[in-house]
Image (cartoon, grey):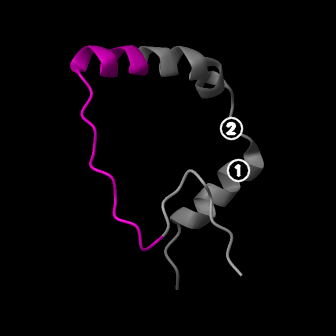
Amino acid sequence: MTKTHPDRPSEGAAAAPAVSLSPSVRRHLGQTLRSAFADTLAAPINPRLEALVEQLAKPKP
């Protein structure tokens, strides 16, 4: 049995049309997101996560 998520359309539902944002709104969102995640981006990467990403980058034999 599969659960449906209320915020996500089901597989059979038609996709909603894309909404275009004005350049000023896009700029404001970008600045807000950059300031909200600045600390996260500056923090060192967890060595375990880095190792997992390296494994994903390696081609499969």
Q: Residue at x 32, y 22 (%)?
A: 26
Q: Position of residue 28 (x, y in %)?
A: 38, 14
Q: Amino acid at mark 2?
A: Ile
At a point 74% along the width and 46% down the height, the residue shown is 47
- Does the magenta run of residues contain 61? no
Kindly identify which residue carries mark 2: 45
Q: Secondary structure at mark 2?
A: loop
Give the quarter of the image for residue 53. Answer: bottom right
Q: Marks 2 and 1: CB-CB under 8 Å? A: yes
The boundaries of the magenta stretch are 11-30
The amino acid beneath tag 1 is: Leu
Query: For mark 1, what is the residue?
Result: 49
Q: Residue 37 versus residue 47: which sits nearer the camera?
A: 37
Say if 58 sits above or below 29 in the image. below
Image side of residue 10 versus residue 50, left or right: left
Q: CA distance from mark 2 to mark 1?
A: 7 Å
**Could you tell me which residue is drawn at 40 percent across and 21 percent down?**
30
The quarter of the picture where residue 54 lies is: bottom right
Q: Is 28 or 4 nearer to us in this picture?
A: 4
Q: Main secondary structure of the magenta part?
A: loop
